[in-house]
């Protein structure tokens, strides 16, 4: 089985079962686990791909060393210091190691990451390895692939490289990648080590960014830690409300697709009727990104509903969103104002 499936897949199988019950073992089970393994590996690849231009002014290896020292000192920190560290991490100010300001979806995914870290650390401590498997699998499949990565790919691909929200998302992805490698290391020993090796190597440089041995292997790193009072209930509540609205919009979009009114969500102008309080502090731009829409109209109402019509705006050739500003430029008439600004800025 090791020769056929590889050591990491065998270890993943061992971690996925509750050894207090009967232990299942079959080729079919390894086929299903192969899908899970590829999902985890592809998640790491996507995160790495989005870190290719992370600023060299904050070398990744230096951040690792600082985080290791933070982990050692955390228990001796005061509550006030922990609160200050949290503020910096969340992007509420421009703290060391983080550029720009985190948007709502960034703060939410970092809060979800804290839950994952806490659950995995507790599971490792009690030898409940199947909980580690299920927690990380759900995080990669649902929170990351279906939501966070899908929602933020527009800013990652189309925003200016140094735009504040792109940098904030990039550093959030760095946090996620770093934590996943550490948490996966006891199970996917070779995969975690391979992924980690790309982060300690400089861009276009065969050598590691740091000469210290601590950064050269994930297996000499400490588990990621979180401080007390890290949970941000308001962010979770707002995202839950937006996800419910996303479901309503999704049903309206699917009906319009079946009726051949639109081909995809970016061709739609959606009118969303809801209580504006449920939208919290999210801007129209954030909501359009969260719902993956080009054109969103919000009307205050007691009952939630969504209606769809085809947007009258032209399609941007770069970001594929239909914007009012497409065609206004004489130099790049096929681009929206955002994309024109990006391509014309040196």
Image (tube, helix red, strand yellow):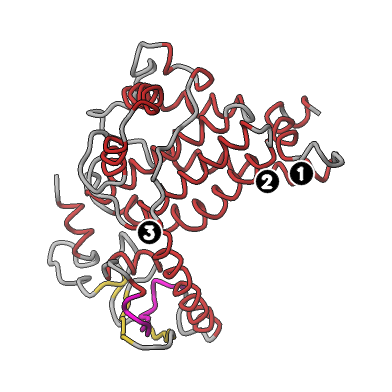
Label 2 SS: helix
**Gap between marks 2 and 1 measured at Cα:** 7 Å
Q: Residue at x 62, y 42 (%)?
A: 38
**Start-end of magenta stretch:** 264-277
Q: Residue at x 54, y 24 (%)?
A: 193
Residue 168 locus on image (x, y percent): 29, 46
- Disc on the earlier residue, 2 or 3: 2
Residue 48 locus on image (x, y percent): 43, 37
Question: Dot 1, crowdedness within 10 Å: few (<14), some or many (≥20)?
Answer: few
In reply to whether residue 267 is colored magenta, the answer given is yes
Depicted 205 relative to depicted 162: above or below: above
Which image quadrant is residue 66 in? top left
**Gap between marks 2 and 3 measured at Cα:** 31 Å
Q: Which residue is mark 3?
A: 235
Of marks 2 and 3, the one in the foreground = 3
Q: Which residue is mark 1?
A: 31
């Amino acid at each position: 089985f090791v020769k056929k499936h590889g050591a990491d897949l065998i270890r993943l199988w061992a971690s996925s079962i509750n050894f207090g019950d009967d232990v299942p073992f079959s080729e079919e089970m390894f086929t299903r686990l192969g899908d899970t393994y590829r999902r985890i590996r592809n998640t790491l690849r996507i995160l790495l791909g989005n870190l290719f231009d992370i600023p060299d002014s904050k070398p990744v290896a230096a951040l690792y060393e600082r985080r290791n020292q933070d982990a050692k000192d955390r228990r001796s920190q005061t509550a006030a210091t922990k609160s200050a560290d949290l503020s910096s991490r969340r992007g509420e100010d421009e703290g060391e190691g983080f550029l720009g300001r985190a948007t709502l979806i960034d703060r939410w995914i970092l809060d979800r990451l804290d839950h994952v870290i806490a659950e995995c650390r507790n599971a490792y401590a009690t030898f409940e390895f199947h909980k580690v498997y299920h927690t990380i699998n759900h995080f990669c499949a649902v929170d990351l692939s279906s939501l966070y990565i899908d929602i933020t790919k527009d800013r990652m691909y189309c925003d200016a490289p140094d735009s504040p929200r792109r940098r904030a998302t990039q550093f959030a992805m760095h946090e996620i990648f770093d934590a996943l490698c550490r948490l996966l290391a006891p199970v996917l020993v070779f995969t975690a080590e391979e992924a980690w090796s790309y982060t300690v190597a400089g861009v276009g440089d065969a050598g590691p960014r740091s000469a210290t041995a601590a950064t050269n292997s994930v297996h000499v790193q400490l588990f990621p830690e979180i401080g007390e009072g890290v949970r941000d209930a308001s962010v979770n509540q707002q995202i839950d409300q937006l996800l419910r609205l996303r479901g309503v919009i999704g049903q309206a979009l699917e009906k319009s697709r079946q009726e051949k009114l639109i081909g995809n969500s970016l061709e739609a102008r959606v009118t969303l009727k809801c209580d504006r309080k449920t939208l919290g502090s999210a801007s129209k731009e954030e909501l359009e990104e969260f719902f993956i829409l080009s054109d969103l109209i919000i009307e205050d109402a007691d009952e939630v509903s969504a209606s769809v019509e085809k947007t009258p705006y032209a399609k941007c050739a770069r970001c594929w969103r239909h914007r009012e500003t497409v065609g206004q430029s004489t130099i790049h008439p096929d681009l929206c104002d955002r994309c024109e600004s990006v391509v014309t800025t040196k």
